[in-house]
Image: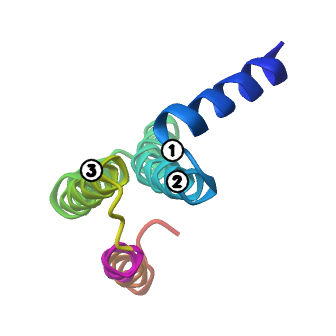
Amino acid sequence: MAILSDACLRTAGTRAYALDQTKELELKLYYEFDKEIKSLDVNLFDLMNVAVLEYRDDDAHFIADFKDDVVNPIIREQYRVLGLLGDDIANGNVDVESIKVRIRTLDEKKAHLAEKLRSAGQLQ
C-alpha cells in the first residue's frame, strides 16, 4: 500500500508542483540538515542524562550550561539556515554554494568546540 501511495504522490507532485529530481535532492538536503540539528540537541540531552544516572551532577550541570551558552546559539543559527533553505526550495531558487558555505561554517564552529572540549579534558 505504501509503495502505491508513494508512486501516486510522486506522480501528482511531479505534475502539479514541478517536483523533479533536483527538487527531491533539495528536499533531501533539507531533511538531512534538519535531522543533524535535532541529533546534536538530543545527543547533548543524552550526555546529560547519562551523567545524572551516574550521579555526576557536576558534569550534568557543565553539559547543561555548555548547551545553553554555547551550543544553543549554534543550533539557532542552524535553524536560521534551515529556514532560508526551506524558503529557497519553496521559491525555486536554491543557491547550493551559499548554503554549503553556511553549513560548512557552522560545522567548523562545532568541530572547534568539540576540539576545545577534548583538549580541556571534559566529556571524555
Please identify the quarter of the rendering in which residue 52 is found. Answer: top left
Magenta region, residue range: 96-108
Residue 68, horizontal then vertical, whole percent: 19, 52
Observer-nearest of 2 and 73: 2
Which circle, 1 or 3, is nearer the viewer? 1
Indicate whether 1 appears above or below 100. Answer: above
Residue at image point 33% right, 46% down = 90
Type of residue at label 2? Lys
Which part of the image, by quadrant, shows the N terminus?
top right
Residue at image point 51% right, 35% down = 53
Q: CA distance from mark 2 to mark 1?
A: 8 Å
Type of residue at label 1? Ala
Observer-nearest of 110 and 122: 110
Q: Earlier in the sequence, mark 1 or mark 3?
A: 1
Using residue 13 as the reference point, say whether residue 111 is left or right of it.
left
- Secondary element at tag 2: helix
Q: Residues within 10 Å of mark 2 (few under 14, many from 20)?
A: some
Q: Residues within 10 Å of mark 3 (few under 14, many from 20)?
A: few
Residue 89, horizontal then vertical, whole percent: 37, 53
Q: CA distance from mark 2 to mark 3?
A: 13 Å
- In the rendered image, which residue does mark 1 sit on? 18
- In the rendered image, which residue does mark 3 sit on? 87
- Secondary element at tag 1: loop
Please identify the quarter of the rendering in which residue 101 is found. Answer: bottom left
Q: Is residue 87 magenta?
A: no
Residue at image point 34% right, 73% down = 95
